[in-house]
Image (cartoon, coloured by chain):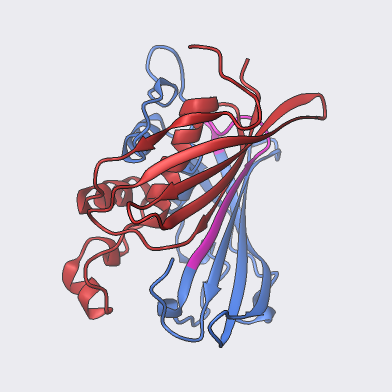
Amino acid sequence: MDTSLAGRTGKPFTMVVEAGKIREFARATKSQNPAYDGGPQGEPVSPTTFLMSAQFWQSGENSPLSGVDLNWERILHGEQEFVFHGAPPRAGDVLTGQARIDKVFEKAGKRGGTMIFTEQVTEFRDPSGRLVAELRSTMIETSKATTEG
Amino acid sequence: MTTTDLTVGAGREPFVDKPLTITDFVRYQGASGDMNPIHHDSSFAAKAGYPTPFAVGMLQAGVLGTFATDWLGAENVRSFKVQFREQAWPGDVLTYSGTITAVREQDGERLVDIELACTRQTGGTHLKGWATFVAPN
């Protein structure tokens, strides 16, 4: 990765938040919380990290790194952040997502070599255009293969 | 629901999970759509130089997230961040824990900041986390 990638955007995509996917995701992440079950009490809210499943609603052109030749064996996921502007999305919500490369910067590695940090932000908006959630993924590219991440 | 203690230093009783299995990884991968074979295909992992498939970091991040929302409320979470540290492996016994670090007012809302961790049976840190919630009623 290099700093020229900053500012690249992916094509917007639509994501429909679904009760069955919320229940499946909550079970997979070992939640006991009835708030994720839905059913007669109403549409469930989605778990904190649920928007990771937005990849079901995306294809290559939705990635800001589409067409960029990358050595994925050297890239690890360093950090992941979720910000909600109000309660997390609820089943039945229809969101528009768009990803962008927010920042690319270099740091010296602790054990020599250079690490390149790339921060990708995906914004999710409701049909009125209100910002509902933001995901920030920090990817770290090392100059040699790694066993961490 | 009992009243949640919202003082700095208060925590939720840690959650000690059953030993991690590749089935856990597959279940999360199916739920999330991340089908990277490094987490379930032994021969693929071996070719990449790993002794076995290793854990999906976002699975444990998800467990840490629901550990926090089972405590402070699914609708109340406003931010959640995880940092991936040591790799986790099948058979690992992971402990999820969290502590309140601040209770503050911002824009007329009462917010609770917490620090979270997911540690391995070795004592090593798999994940560190931080979250902010609107204070539960």
Vertical arrangement, residue A49 with respect to residue A117, above or below? above
**Horizontal side of residue A114 vs B54, given as left or right:** right
Residue A101 in view, yes or no:
yes
**Horizontal side of residue B77 vs B33, given as left or right:** right
- Count of labels shown? 0
Q: In terms of image quadrants, where is residue B133?
A: top right
Vertical arrangement, residue B58 with respect to residue A18, above or below? below
* Closest to the observer, B83 or A139: B83
**Horizontal side of residue B94 vs A87, given as left or right:** left
Give residue A147's position: percent from left, percent from top.
38, 73
Quadrant containing the C terminus of chain B is: top right
Give residue B17's position: percent from left, percent from top.
30, 40
| Residue at 26% from the left image edge and 74% from the top image edge | B50
* Closest to the observer, B129 or A22: B129
* Closest to the observer, A15 or B50: B50
Q: Which chain is red?
A: B
Give residue B24's position: percent from left, percent from top.
26, 47
| Residue at 53% from the left image edge and 30% from the top image edge | B11
Give residue A103's position: percent from left, percent from top.
69, 69
> Residue B111 magenta-drawn?
no
Q: In the rendering, what colour is chain A?
A: blue
The stretch in magenta equals: A77-94
Vertical arrangement, residue A81 with respect to residue A43, above or below? below
**Which residue, as the protein is rendered here, is positioned at the far left?**
B43
Vertical arrangement, residue A7 with respect to residue B120, above or below? below
Residue A53 in view, yes or no:
no
